[in-house]
Each structure stands twice: as C-alpha cells, then as structure tokens.
C-alpha cells in the first residue's frame, strides 16, 4: 500500500472519510503519547489543521478500516459504509507526527484480552472511554440521523459484498411510528446512531445461558498511572466485552452524534466538540458533558426503541453473515428475547445505575488491616454531609483531592482502617467508592454493619447539594442497589443525626431528606441511643426502630 495524497473527489456529502493506512507502518506499542482523551483531541486537531477544509465543514473523523490490520473486514461496517456511499481514502503517513500515529494505532480498535482492555483512553472527568464506538457515533452524527432499511427481502442467500446496494431512506426518527404495537413488530430499519451499541449488546447477550448482569456488564478497571496512563487492567477477570469503557464510548458517540445532527452549521470541529464535552459542557451547556452521560443517555435512548435496534441489528447480522456461529438458525422469537434481555440489562444495570469512580481513580491509599464483609442485602441508607471539606467539589481533581484528604484524616488522625463512608457523592456527577458495597464502613457508630453510609461532599447546613447529586442518592443508587440484591426493597433512609448525636447531614439537607421516599421519620435519636446501648450487650436488634 502506498501513501496517496488527498483527493477532492472523496469529499462526499461534505464529509471526509479518512482511512489511516498509516497503521501498517507502525510497530505496536510504539506510541509515546499517554492514553488520554486529550491525546485523541490532539490527533483530531492536527488532522483538522492538515486536511483541506471544504464548505466550512471540518474534517469528519479518523477511522481505520484496514483489512490487513485487523483481519477480515467487519461485514456490518462494510454494509453501513456502502449505505452511506462513502469512499475511503488513505492519509499520507507522514501527515501525522510519529507519536500521533502511534496513538491513533493504539486506540483504533477496542478489545478485551484477559484482564487487559485495549483501545481506551482516560478522560478528564476520570472516566475511561473506548475510542472506536465514540468515533462510530460521531461518524453517524455527521451523516445525519439515518434509518437504514434492512435488506429483508434478500432471504436465505444474501447478495455478495459487491452486490450490496441497500436502500437508504433518510427519515426523521420522529416519523417512525411509536404506536403501542410497534414493539411487537419486527423492525425494518436500524438507526445509524445506535448500531454500534446495538450490535455489541446483541452479540454479547447471544452468548449462551450465562446471566450477563454485573459484573458481566459494565466492568470497571484501573490505569497503571493517572498522569501518563498506558495500561488499563480490568478489576474483574471474567469481564465481558461490554465494559464500562465500551459503554461510555458508545453512549458518548450516540449523544455527540445526536448533537451533531442537530447542530447549526457550520458544525463545530470535532476536536473542539470533544474538548467541550469532556470539559465544561458542549456549547456552554453544563449538562451536555461526559459527567452526565448516563442521565443524558436515558433521555436519548428509550428501552422500546433500543430493543428494536438490537433486534434489527441482529437480523441484519444474520443476513450479512449467514454462517455466524451464534446467529445461525436463531428464530425471530429467540432474537427478540435476546434483544429484550440485552436492553433491560443495559437500561437498568448501566443507564439506571450511578457512575461510580473506583478507588484507583481517586488515588486511594490501601485499606489497613482486614476488612469485615457486610451481610447483604442491607436494610438502611444513612445520609451524611462531609462538613469538611465544606465546599462542593465539581471536578475530578477537587473531588479526588477531597477523598484523599478525608481518607488521610480517617486513617491517620482517627486511626480507622480506611475512609469511613461507603460512597461519597461529588457535585461533578460522580459517586466515589469508599468502602464500597461489600465491606463494613465507619460512618454511623453502632449501625455500620446494617447500612451503607453515603456522604455528600460539602456543608449542607444552610444550602443544598446540586440536583444532579441529590437525584443519584435519592433515586438512582437505591434503585440500582435493590435490583442488584445489595439493598432490601423495603430499605429505610435515615439522616446520620437520627442515630448519632450530630448535626450531620446539616439542617438544610436533613429537611429535604424528610420528603424523600423510604425516609423513616420514626427513628429518633433517643430510641436509637437506647437501641445502640442495648446492642452493646446483646446481639443487635433487627432494626434501629425496635422499641
Ligand atoms: C439467571 O437468570 C435466571 C432467570 O432470570 C435466574 O433464575 C437465575 O437465578 C440467574 N442465575 C444467576 C447465577 O444469577
Ligand atoms: C499491564 O498491567 C498488567 C497488570 O498490572 C500487567 O500484567 C501487564 O503486563 C501490563 N502490560 C504492559 C504492556 O505493561
Ligand atoms: C457550615 O455552614 C454554616 C451555615 O452556613 C456555617 O455557619 C458554618 O461555619 C459552616 N461550617 C464550615 C466548616 O464551613
């Protein structure tokens, strides 16, 4: 393959499709740039600068489709490419500096091999993001929101690759009937924005009788180091390919793709768009940020629509790859069951759960001593404020620094094994793992083994946490924990002051807690103290309310 120069005829519908044939020139692992989202943004900025800009439309995207690089070409991608009438071109490998080339190669493909996850980068908000599904969503968005007709009439023998001439109907997705029976009808189209997510959801949940609930879906991992990350290792050795990083990338791709279909022209440069999205928010909107991707994703993607997408994508794959080992001989009924299950897991166990930064993201010191396991499910959530730090934290840097200082205080000054809280809620959209779901904390004296201690960073004597943070503790975390069997469905929510003489969680926050679901106004400090004294002599009573 020889380097070629830019060819203006390849500008199709204002979009450049860049095939980075340059991957072939590089040794694996030769990149010297850290695996950060900022490095990806740097590559895009460089491409935007070097590529010819036509019609004031920025360069579309970086992609690699090199068959030589990754084995046989993905038939789904091939189908979609043709349907978009795009032509690939190659970029002169000398266009990018060697370190940018190295990075591009390193993140081009997402994969999970054993416990190592490849093709992912660390974003400024502390989340890890797979680049491949992110770019796929951006591509789809730049193409406009499309519903692609499934080749349903081509039955048993699909046409060979050169024969694909799928009929692309560009429709506003709103036109698609959402009548009550739409759910039961076989889909006839797939939505280009959701195809990547739908394919991986469908294929993962096809794989047999295993239950892909946590930790199969949404596995977390840790970087070797946070300043110059190179190596990402999953925490659970049995992780499915549907890692948190993959789902983050697919969701960011869908959200940003959706934004691009609506963005006024000229469209923003992708480097600029990503800087905003992984920073303060797109176009000054503080909610269109990576920090709030799950909440935004739940608004964008309804469960019935996603079920149709997963089902449709599986039908498409069945047509394109008749010899696919898992899809062969699957009936429509079986496919719709897979699609329904996959969608339910994704919406309930991922979109419907809080985004929790594991300990490695905030730089936790190790636990001292031997943790005591909790006996799950627990019956209580105890709400705290940290009081000190008194200011809400709104960035990864400040929230992580707060976590470390609280941990130091609890370990060194208080002499505890670890930071006391089970989880800590930042005002950056993230929850931070303290002792976590499985170990007894040190947050609510006398009651630590019966409930999770949840603290909001800040002093909520006179003010309230931001709504996004309140929502996570009020609705998202309890629903997710009950579903996962960590919290009893009849759990009770209490303020710290109901059990221990303290002002915590602050007057303002406590007044608000009284209006929340599952708040138990019957628990008062006096009965609690008696229960606490009793519990020192006898085995602990079943609930702190016991008279
Ligand atoms: C798997 O799912 C089935 C049906 O939802 C359930 O009955 C079973 O207990 C689950 N198995 C495991 C190991 O979670
Ligand atoms: C990445 O980290 C894991 C676990 O720490 C280690 O086993 C592996 O060898 C590392 N890989 C590289 C390429 O450094
Ligand atoms: C907490 O807020 C209250 C009310 O604004 C204030 O009186 C108190 O000094 C604050 N405490 C800290 C540690 O900032």
Image (cartoon, rainbow, N blue to C red):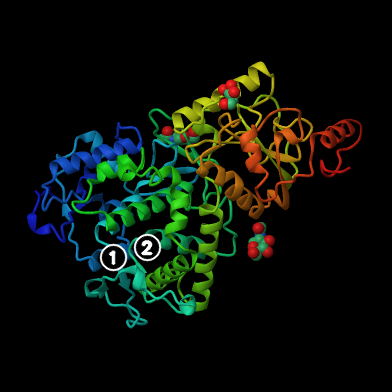
Q: Quadrant of residue 541?
A: top right
Note whether 377 is above or below 386 in the view shown.
Answer: below
For the question of whether residue 525 can be seen, the reply is yes
Specify the label residue 195 is tagged with: 2
For the question of whether residue 331 can be seen, the reply is no
Q: Which of 220 and 28 is in front in this view?
A: 220
Q: Which of 328 and 308 is in front in this view?
A: 308
Residue 152 image position (x, y, % from top left)? 35, 80
Left or right of 108? Residue 340 is: right
Quadrant of the image containing the C terminus: top right
Residue 384 image position (x, y, % from top left)? 65, 34
The residue depicted at 45 percent of the width and 57 percent of the height is: 299
Q: Quadrant of ligand 3?
A: top right
Q: Quadrant of residue 419?
A: top right
* Mark 2 touches mark 1? (CB < 8 Å): yes
State which tag comes first along the sequence, 2 or 1: 1
Residue 526 image position (x, y, % from top left)? 83, 34
Mark 1 lies on a secondary structure that is: helix
* Residue that carries the numbered disc 1 in the rendered image: 80
Note whether 485 is above or below 203 in the view shown.
Answer: above
Q: How far is mark 2 from mark 1, CA to CA?
A: 9 Å
Q: Quadrant of residue 325?
A: bottom left
């Amino acid at each position: 393959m020889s380097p070629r120069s830019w060819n203006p005829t390849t500008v199709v519908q204002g979009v450049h499709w860049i095939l980075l044939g340059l991957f072939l020139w590089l040794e694996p692992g030769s990149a010297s740039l850290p695996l950060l989202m900022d490095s990806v943004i740097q590559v895009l900025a460089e491409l935007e600068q070097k590529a010819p800009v036509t019609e004031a439309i920025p360069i579309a995207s970086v992609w690699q489709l090199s068959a030589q690089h990754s084995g046989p070409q993905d038939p789904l991608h091939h189908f979609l490419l043709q349907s978009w009438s795009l032509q690939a071109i190659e970029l002169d490998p000398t266009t990018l500096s060697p370190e940018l080339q190295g990075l591009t190669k390193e993140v081009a493909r997402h994969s999970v091999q054993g416990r190592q996850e490849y093709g992912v980068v660390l974003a400024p908000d502390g989340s890890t993001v797979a680049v491949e599904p992110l770019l796929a969503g951006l591509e789809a968005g730049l193409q406009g929101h499309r519903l692609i007709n499934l080749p349903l009439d081509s039955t048993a023998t699909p046409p060979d690759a050169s024969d694909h001439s799928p009929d692309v109907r560009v429709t506003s997705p709103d036109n698609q009937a959402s009548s009550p029976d739409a759910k039961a009808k076989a889909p006839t189209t797939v939505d280009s924005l959701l195809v990547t997510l739908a394919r991986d959801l469908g294929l993962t949940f096809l794989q047999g009788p295993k239950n892909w609930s946590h930790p199969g879906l949404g596995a977390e991992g840790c970087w070797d180091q946070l300043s110059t990350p190179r190596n990402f290792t999953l925490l659970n050795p049995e992780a499915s390919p549907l890692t948190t990083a993959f789902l983050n990338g697919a969701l960011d791709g869908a959200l940003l793709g959706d934004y691009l279909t609506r963005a006024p022209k000229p469209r923003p440069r992708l480097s600029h768009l990503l800087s905003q999205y992984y920073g303060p928010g797109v176009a000054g909107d503080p909610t269109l940020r990576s920090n709030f991707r799950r909440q935004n994703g739940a608004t964008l993607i309804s469960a019935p629509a996603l079920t149709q997408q997963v089902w449709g994508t599986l039908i498409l794959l069945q047509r394109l790859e008749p010899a696919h080992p898992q899809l062969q001989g699957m009936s429509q009924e079986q496919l719709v069951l897979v699609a329904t299950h996959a969608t339910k897991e994704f919406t309930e166990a991922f979109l419907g759960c809080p985004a929790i930064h594991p300990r490695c993201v905030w730089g936790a010191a190790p636990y001292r001593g031997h943790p005591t396991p909790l006996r799950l499910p627990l019956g209580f959530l105890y709400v705290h404020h940290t009081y000190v730090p008194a200011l809400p934290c709104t960035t990864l840097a400040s929230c992580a620094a707060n976590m470390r200082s609280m941990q130091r205080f609890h370990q060194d000054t208080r002499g505890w094994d670890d930071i006391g809280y089970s989880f800590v809620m930042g005002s950056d959209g993230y929850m931070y793992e303290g002792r976590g779901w499985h170990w007894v904390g040190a947050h609510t004296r006398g009651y630590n083994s019966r409930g999770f201690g949840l603290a909001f960073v800040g002093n909520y004597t006179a003010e309230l946490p931001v709504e996004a943070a309140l929502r996570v503790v009020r609705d998202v975390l309890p629903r997710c924990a009950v579903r996962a069997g960590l919290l009893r469905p009849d759990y009770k929510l209490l303020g710290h002051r109901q059990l221990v003489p303290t002002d915590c969680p602050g007057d303002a926050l406590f007044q608000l807690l009284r209006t929340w679901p599952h708040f138990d106004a019957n628990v008062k400090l006096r009965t609690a103290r008696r229960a606490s004294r009793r519990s020192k002599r006898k085995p602990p009573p079943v609930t702190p309310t016991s008279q």
